[in-house]
Amino acid sequence: MVDDIKEDDFDVDEGGQVEIIGWLYQYYNIEPHDKVVNINGGPIKTNDIPAATQLFTTDWVVRYMVDNSLGRLYLEYFPDSPIKEKLFYLLPGPIEERTDSFDLSKLKVLDDAMGSGHILVYAFDLLIRMYEEQGYGKRDATDAILAHNLYGLEIDKRAYQLAYFALMMKARQYNRRILSKPIRHNLHVFESTVDVPNEVFEKINASKDTIDDLHTLVSIFRQAKLLGSIMHFEKKFDFDALFCAVNSLPDSTQLDLFGLQAAKNTLQSILRIAQVLQTHFDVVATNPPYLNRMNGDLKKYVKKYYKAYSGDLFSVFIWKNIEMTKQDGYSAYMTPFVWMFIKTYEGLRKSILDSKQISSLIQMEYSAFEEATVPINTFVLKNDMNADATGTYLKLSDFKGGMEVQKKYVLTAIADPSVGYLYRTKQTNFEKVPGSPIAYWVPHKFTELFTDRKVDGEYDLTGSQHITADNKKFLRYFWEINSEKIGKKGKWARYSKGGPFRKYYGNNHYVVDISLPALKFYSSNSTSNLLDKKYWFKQGIAYTDITSGKPSFRFFVGGLFDKSGPVLCNVKELNYLLGLLNSKVFSYYLPIVNPTIHMQVKDIKNFPIIHQENGKLAKVKSVVQQTIEIAKSDYSDDESSNEFENFTILTHIAEHQKSPTTKLLIFFDFCDKYVPIQFRGLIFYGKLSKKR
């Protein structure tokens, strides 16, 4: 701490107070985090969830989230407020003026996965400015913020303690006497409850319905450490009646045989947290946990209550938090950006696009956030549906580097909204593209293409694939097998298995065993899959599923294929489709529907297609055929090609400079492999037995 950390990081005036607490706690958690997330890739246990999901939120991202939610909300009431000049990360865009009444003491801000409290502490600073502008002194403002404005929830007790400490230090910055009196605050930590003795309920003076509600809450909170803020309640509770009932229990000052005092404290804690979870907030801002390796209990719970958003814990938080937001309120997030594109989160996207408004969004460069192994975005939703509203988006994908680089380009865009990576668009455009990806950079003309025909309606494409379950046993390179045994009448078939980037032709290295014993294995083994025979030995278009942003499609002569090298079979106008898929248009389209490195058949099926007139179609097919021949010639110049005969460069050597012709090696079937055999300089002809 003394030698490696800058002194400014400890300086309150430099904003270091929050940063240092958060980062120290994250580094403290490195070993337990790595231990938990690397164990066999299995589900995360309940007690390990905090270690697996605790990530500190970068300071400028916190400021973006709060400036564009709490800050924007305040400006909607007071558009001429000088506070606007202090909102350094407020993205440019129109701000709608509100005319309803405003009471700052009733403004509520929640972080329901607060960690070490970074978001709440920055919100505290902003709220102080608001109170001062409304005529309050700093001391009174400090008390009001703690008592009325800021709320936090956390499943990790150590993180909760740090958040409480950070918030108290922030409060003391504005009121030196704050710690000299009882402090009312709204920070809570989830604790799983044990059964409350029946004797306790018998001593509560309340109606049967109220007692039943208490039983229900105790039952739910048995899983408090597992569920945390995603707890689901079937009904709206009457908390006035519940608190009154619990407070009817006498305070125990003597020997507490039935644990009345402990039970009373537990029930009061449950009620305080449940009340927060059933409150609607003006602003909810958080960096939620990222967790898709849920244990059985958590997965079952999420599937039951949040099925459409169950792809990851962060997607559950996205939806639950916007639902906890008041009408016209804001929810702000930092999450992986996969929710914007892939099929797993299609339900979440459609729910947001149908009923909420994306106010602003920043998509960061793929590897910018080094603390997590996932690409990140930060965004703000408004609990309102306005079809004519225009959101503001920043696409930082081209700017390599860490979070400081991303910060630089965000500030540049705020200072100069004309930069090429700032976009404004209506979210109704997203629904025109299959799967509704949040493709904000796509021109309107391009989205209009999706109302036309698409590949799926024009071609018979298969999503089927062959799985051997034991590639070492059932796959060979073509040069290991006698060519006479490869084909429809042989025991081996050509096999498409992906490979490096190569367009139009190539990557024909493998063959797969299709002998009767092998077919029997594929059909009976639980982890194998036998490709439907109607796709066997069909010419088609092969591609590599791992694209790394550069898709490539090739002519396939026919055979079988697996998930790494899928083949589009039964393709009419094969050359036309092959040329189209290898075009710049498809390369532009693919990141819109799937920015990951794995291309899927559905991505191809949804590609819009416009057929040309016969004359133009013939020309395209002819050009593609020429390209295939060129690619084939290039591929056959490689020694690993099944069509290699000689190096092309040798054809340009003068006759008198050529080496004497050498005899070709003779290959034999030997131990299930087709190999050249030569002993002491002599080549033996004939078939060797397996014993030999």
Image (spheres, rainbow, N blue to C red):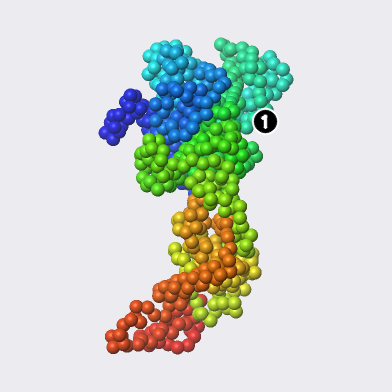
Q: Is 336 positioned to the left or the right of 662 in the image?
A: right
Q: Is 253 positioned to the left or the right of 659 in the image?
A: right
Q: Which residue is drawn at 38% across and 46% down?
A: 399
Q: Residue at x 58, y 17 (%)?
A: 261
Determine the residue located farthest toward the left in the rendered image.
3
> Compared to 252, does 62 lie above or below?
below
The kind of residue on which mark 1 rests is Glu
- Mark 1 is surrounded, within 10 Å at the Cα level, by few (under 14), some (14 to 19) or many (20 or more) other residues, namely few
Q: Which residue is drawn at 57% across and 51% down?
A: 448
> Compared to 418, does 449 lie above or below?
below
Q: Which of 227 and 336 is in front in this view?
A: 336
The answer to which image quadrant residue 633 occupies is: bottom left
Determine the residue located farthest toward the right in the rendered image.
208
Question: Label 1: which residue?
Answer: 234
- Asked if residue 334 can be seen in this view, the reply is yes
Where in the figure is residue 214, as x and y percent of width and height?
A: 66, 23
Where in the figure is residue 393, as x and y percent of width and height?
A: 47, 40
Where in the figure is residue 598, as x and y percent of width and height?
A: 50, 55
